[in-house]
Image: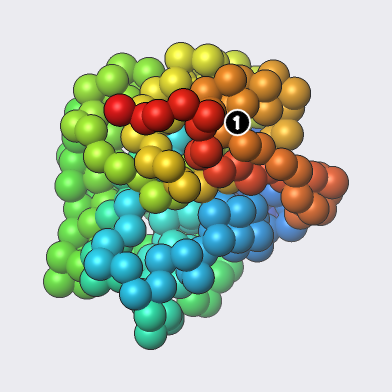
C-alpha cells in the first residue's frame, strides 16, 4: 500500500498540504464550506427530495468532509433519496488518522468519519467501492490523477458536481479544460455544479461547455463562490 499523503496541522487546526502549499479548506471551517459552497451551491438537500437516487461527482476527496457532510444531510432528511452515490477522485489519499482528526471538531460528522475510517485501507490506485447504511450510501473512490480517472470511469449521470481541489494557482491541472470536459461528460441537462473559486478562466471554460455559471455570496474570507447549471444551447446526445 502506498504511504499516506503527509499533511501539516496549523495552530488554528486548519490542515495544510506541503505538496501544494495550500490549505484543505477555508479558515471558516470545512463543515460551513461544505454546506454553503457545495451542498448549497447544488441546491441540496432540497433538490434530491423524493428522488429514487442521487449521484454526486467530486474532483478532490481530500479529507472526506464534503462526503461526510452530504451523508449527514442525507441521514437527517425525511425526503432523502433511497440511494446516495458519491463518486470522488483523489490522487493523494491521506491517512485514516487525519480523516478522524479533521472530523473530530464536528460532533455531527465524527461518528460517520469513524465508519469511513474503518473501511479506509488498501487504497491502491484504481477504483474502490465503500458501502454504508446497508448499501443505501455508496462511496466510489477513484484513486489516481483526475484526468485518467475521469476517462476510465463508467458513464453515469451526475446530478451534482463538486469541483474541489487546491487553488488553480497551486494545482492548475485540477482546473484544466480537460478536467472540465471530463466532468461535463457526466452531466445531464439540469445538473448543478458548485465550487469555491470564481476564476475567470473557469467561468469561461464552463460556459463554453454548456454551463450557465453565476457568482454567489462566498464564505469568509472569500467574497464569492460559484454555482452553475448545465443548460447547453445544443441537444445533448
Q: Is residue 224 above or below residue 70?
A: above
| Residue at image coords 15%, 65% | 135
Along the viewing direction, whichever of 139 and 41 lies nearer the viewer: 41
Q: In terms of image quadrants, where is residue 89?
A: top left
Along the viewing direction, whichever of 236 and 177 lies nearer the viewer: 236
Q: Is residue 62 above or below residue 55?
A: above
Residue 36 at x, y percent in the picture: 65, 60
Along the viewing direction, whichever of 123 and 204 lies nearer the viewer: 204
Quarter holding the C terminus is top left
Describe residue 87's horizontal placement relative to residue 179 as left or right: left
Are there few (<14), some (14-19), or many (20+) residues within 10 Å of tag 1?
Answer: many
Residue 34 at x, y percent in the picture: 57, 57
| Residue at image coords 56%, 33% | 211
Outermost residue toward the bottom?
78
| Residue at image coords 60%, 31% | 166
**Dot 1 corresponds to which residue?**
166
Figure colour scheme: rainbow
Q: In terms of image quadrants, where is residue 53?
A: bottom left
| Residue at image coords 30%, 43% | 157
Quarter holding the N terminus is top left
Amino acid at each position: 500500500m502506498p504511504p499516506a499523503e503527509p499533511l501539516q496541522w496549523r495552530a488554528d487546526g486548519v490542515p495544510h498540504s506541503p505538496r501544494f502549499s495550500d490549505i484543505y479548506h477555508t479558515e471558516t471551517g470545512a463543515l460551513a464550506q461544505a454546506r454553503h459552497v457545495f451542498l448549497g451551491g447544488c441546491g441540496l438537500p432540497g433538490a434530491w427530495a423524493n428522488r429514487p437516487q442521487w449521484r454526486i461527482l467530486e474532483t478532490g476527496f481530500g479529507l472526506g468532509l464534503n462526503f461526510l457532510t452530504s451523508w449527514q444531510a442525507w441521514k437527517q432528511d425525511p425526503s432523502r433519496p433511497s440511494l446516495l452515490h458519491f463518486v470522488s477522485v483523489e490522487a493523494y489519499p491521506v491517512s485514516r488518522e487525519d480523516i478522524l482528526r479533521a472530523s473530530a471538531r464536528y460532533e455531527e460528522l465524527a461518528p460517520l468519519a469513524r465508519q469511513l475510517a474503518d473501511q479506509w485501507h488498501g487504497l491502491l490506485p484504481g477504483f474502490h467501492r465503500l458501502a454504508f447504511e446497508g448499501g443505501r450510501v455508496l462511496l466510489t473512490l477513484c484513486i489516481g490523477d483526475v484526468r485518467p480517472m475521469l476517462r476510465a470511469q463508467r458513464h453515469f449521470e451526475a446530478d451534482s458536481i463538486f469541483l474541489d481541489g487546491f487553488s488553480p494557482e497551486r494545482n492548475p491541472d485540477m482546473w484544466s479544460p480537460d478536467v472540465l470536459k471530463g466532468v461535463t461528460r457526466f452531466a445531464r441537462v439540469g445538473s448543478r455544479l458548485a465550487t469555491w473559486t470564481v476564476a475567470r478562466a473557469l467561468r469561461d471554460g464552463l460556459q463554453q461547455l454548456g454551463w450557465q455559471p453565476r457568482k454567489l455570496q462566498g464564505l469568509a474570507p472569500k467574497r464569492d463562490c460559484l454555482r452553475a447549471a448545465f443548460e447547453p444551447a445544443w441537444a445533448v446526445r
